[in-house]
Amino acid sequence: MSMPPEPPLLSVEDLTVTFTGRGRTDVRAVSGVSFDVARGQVTGLVGESGCGKSVTSLALMGLLPKKGVTVGGRAAFEGTDLLGLRREQLRDLRGSKLAMIFQDPLSSLNPVIPIGLQVTEILTRHRGLRGEAARKEAAALLERVGIPDPTRRLKEYPHQLSGGMRQRALIAMAVACAPQLLIADEPTTALDVTIQAQILELLKELVDQQGTALLMITHDMGVVAGLCDRVNVLYAGKVVEAAERRPLFAAPTHPYAHGLLGSIPRLDAPRGEPLNPIRGSISDTIAWSDGCAFAPRCDFYSEQCLNGTPQLTEPHSAGHQVRCVHPVAATGKEGADR
């Protein structure tokens, strides 16, 4: 008798985030995003700046401001809706079962507090370690993430560390309590490619060794190719394509995902061949209620694209979802259903 499938660690359903302000038009930054994260899985949220990736992560962690922001939907973590928890309850979860690596380590770390105190604060709050025991554990964490001479580094301030070391310190703080879910928001931004590779390898090791679920937020398709198991492509606050990594890279189905992959320079391309960027910018959108938000930038546009919000379907294979009335076929040409 087969065992029933294990429920996802995190299940996000119809997440919406709206920024409001007196005398200003409401801005819907996240518009009905749904996805699952399984235990030990690396799930990617991918898209250009402004598509709603970081806002989604901040909403899940309860870090959005209370005033001027309306959050809706459901985010079930081990069956508990994160969006319905009080601040005190979220503080108990953050750092212990949920952790986040922020995009800019220099602004995320407190500049006037030594690295050691920032790490030991987490150990004291969630693991009850104090004094010498906390300092030894903090040094062990820094050593684990590849920071040389960790005992000396504990006494240093963020500005005394390189960008790669600051990012490693943030990762050490995030994994101090072996969280079940780790959210990484552009963890390799502004780092050189060598340090990027080291950080990604470190994250991969943490997932493999601890069974941690990782939600990777990035615009870098190279990061996605090397790390993610399942990928959710966001555009204008909605998931427009969701698939396992290999099927997505082999046959991107939404014109936006197809354009993201097509705009990446290739080493095997003929010399002098021009790049193929997506035309326009993220600001060239229409409201989802009026049709496909990507329509103004889409090469496959037709009047049918303006017949209300397109729904997620599986036009080519099971588990490969796309929000488009003219999905791209596996050949890279427009779908035959146009």
Image (tube, helix red, strand yellow):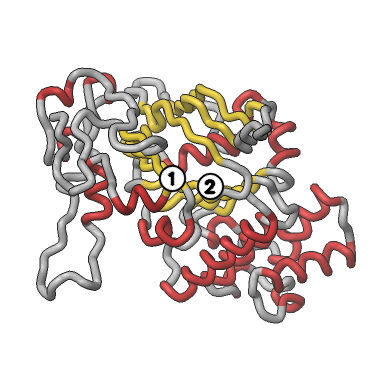
Circle 2 Cα neighbour tier, 10 Å, few/some/many (<14 / 14–19 / ≥20): many
167 over 30 or under it: above or below: below
Name the residue furthest front. 1
Task: Report how far apart the C-alphas of labels 2 and 1 lie in the structure.
Answer: 7 Å
Disc 1 residue type (three-letter): Leu
191 over 125 or under it: above or below: below
Question: In front here: 205 or 154?
Answer: 205
Disc 2 residue type (three-letter): Leu
What residue would you read off at disc 2?
215
Question: In front here: 91 or 249?
Answer: 249
Q: Residue at x 56, y 64 (%)?
A: 167
282 over 266 or under it: above or below: above
- Where residue 321 appears, as percent x and y from the top left, is 36, 35
Q: Earlier in the sequence, mark 2 or mark 1?
A: 1
Q: Residue at x 36, y 42 (%)?
A: 233
What residue would you read off at disc 1?
45
Q: Quadrant of the C terminus?
A: top left
Circles 2 and 1, Cβ within 8 Å, touching? The answer is: yes
Q: Quadrant of the N terminus?
A: top right
- Where residue 241 appears, as percent x and y from the top left, is 34, 38
